[in-house]
């Protein structure tokens, strides 16, 4: 947390307030029925949000709660691309100046769309520079509010608004939510929104810091030499205390999936559901298709994002 982000814990009341805000500006994303290999389950298509990912939720909740003085000073955020677009979209709609610190190797599509939405983009070396230090210095210099991609109570509550929608669409809380997980903002938000559901975070193999943290009971980092992954949206080195406080209460375990399993899920979503999923947005589906996670008619899988470069997606559609 930062000087620009008051210390408080996210809660279910905040999630409900965020959901009410979202309902005023955007229609719910579809909840799609899926049948595969004798199993029936549901898929929440957050990839169909205006910015192509669920991140619009937390950004909107955070920025709409800024004071007039804070709005006048602008916002700073860090993101590999989806949070960047969510913040940029909300900032443009609210007339707020936004600066986003993004990795230089982020997908070109995400960099271009963030700029198209009117935000200033500052790039950095993902493996050698500390994005938090860069963003904190920028926020201090400009007197701007720092909107963290996952370690922010408003952001967590905003992401959880997807769970309120799911319960309304199903007519009940799901028994199980399988979630694409990076820093844990979406996972924690859904845990607050659906207290009766089993919550299962899924990460790319080698980037499963949340899963390992749940197993050990303490926050663990990815480590010094994580393997390459196509899941740019999920390359978070460690979750934060505000997220882990929720996750360790609600998540019994985490799962990881391979790069090959992720590509299978992307192809499945395209062929069977007519959806384009980026790698990071397909990991939860990958866990189910690979039989690493159980799924039934009360299970909802989050398809968290669909922002992928066309050439990269075309390559995925070619069989391995």
Image: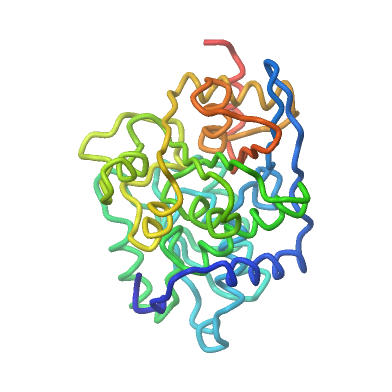
The x, y position of residue 73, in whole percent, is 49, 82
Which of the 4 quarters of the picture holds residue 297?
top right
Tell me the colour scheme of the image: rainbow
> Along the line of sight, which residue is nearer the eye, 203 or 250?
250
- The residue shown at (55%, 39%) is 178
95 left or right of 251? right
| The N terminus: image quadrant | bottom left
Tag count: 0
- The residue shown at (26%, 46%) is 220
Q: Residue furthest top?
A: 320
> Along the line of sight, which residue is nearer the eye, 155 or 39?
39
> Along the line of sight, which residue is nearer the eye, 204 or 67?
204
Q: Residue furthest left?
A: 224
The x, y position of residue 181, in whole percent, is 47, 44
- The residue shown at (42%, 75%) is 8
Q: Residue furthest bottom?
A: 69
Give the answer, above or below, for where 220 lies relative to 59.
Answer: above
The x, y position of residue 188, in whole percent, is 48, 55
- The residue shown at (27%, 51%) is 219
The x, y position of residue 231, in whole percent, is 46, 35
33 left or right of 311? right
Which of the 4 quarters of the picture holds residue 68?
bottom right
221 left or right of 249? left
């Amino acid at each position: 947390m930062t000087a620009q982000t008051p210390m408080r814990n996210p809660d279910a009341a905040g999630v409900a307030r965020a959901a009410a805000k979202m309902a005023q500006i955007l229609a719910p994303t579809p909840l799609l029925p899926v049948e595969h290999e004798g199993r029936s389950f549901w898929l929440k298509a957050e990839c169909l949000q205006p910015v192509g990912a669920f991140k619009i939720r937390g950004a909107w909740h955070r920025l709409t709660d800024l004071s007039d003085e804070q709005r006048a000073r602008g916002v700073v955020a860090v993101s590999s691309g989806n949070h960047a677009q969510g913040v940029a979209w909300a900032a443009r709609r609210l007339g707020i100046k936004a600066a986003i610190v993004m990795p230089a190797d982020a997908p070109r599509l995400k960099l271009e769309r963030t700029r198209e939405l009117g935000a200033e983009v500052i790039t950095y070396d993902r493996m050698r520079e500390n994005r938090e230090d860069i963003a904190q210095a920028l926020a201090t210099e400009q007197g701007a509010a720092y909107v963290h991609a996952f370690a922010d109570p408003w952001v967590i509550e905003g992401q959880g608004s997807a769970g309120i929608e799911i319960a309304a669409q199903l007519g009940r809380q799901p028994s199980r939510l399988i979630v694409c997980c990076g820093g844990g903002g979406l996972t924690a938000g859904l845990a607050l929104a659906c207290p009766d559901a089993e919550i299962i975070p899924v990460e790319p193999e080698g980037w499963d810091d949340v899963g390992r943290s749940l197993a050990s009971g303490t926050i663990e980092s990815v480590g010094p030499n994580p393997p390459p992954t196509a899941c740019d949206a999920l390359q978070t080195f460690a979750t934060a205390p505000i997220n882990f406080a929720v996750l360790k209460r609600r998540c019994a375990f985490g799962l990881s999936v391979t790069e090959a399993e992720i590509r299978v899920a992307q192809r499945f979503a395209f062929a069977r559901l007519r959806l384009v999923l980026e790698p990071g947005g397909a990991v939860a589906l990958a866990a189910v298709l690979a039989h690493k996670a159980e799924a039934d008619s009360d299970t909802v899988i989050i398809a968290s994002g669909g922002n992928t470069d066309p050439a990269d997606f075309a390559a995925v559609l070619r069989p391995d």
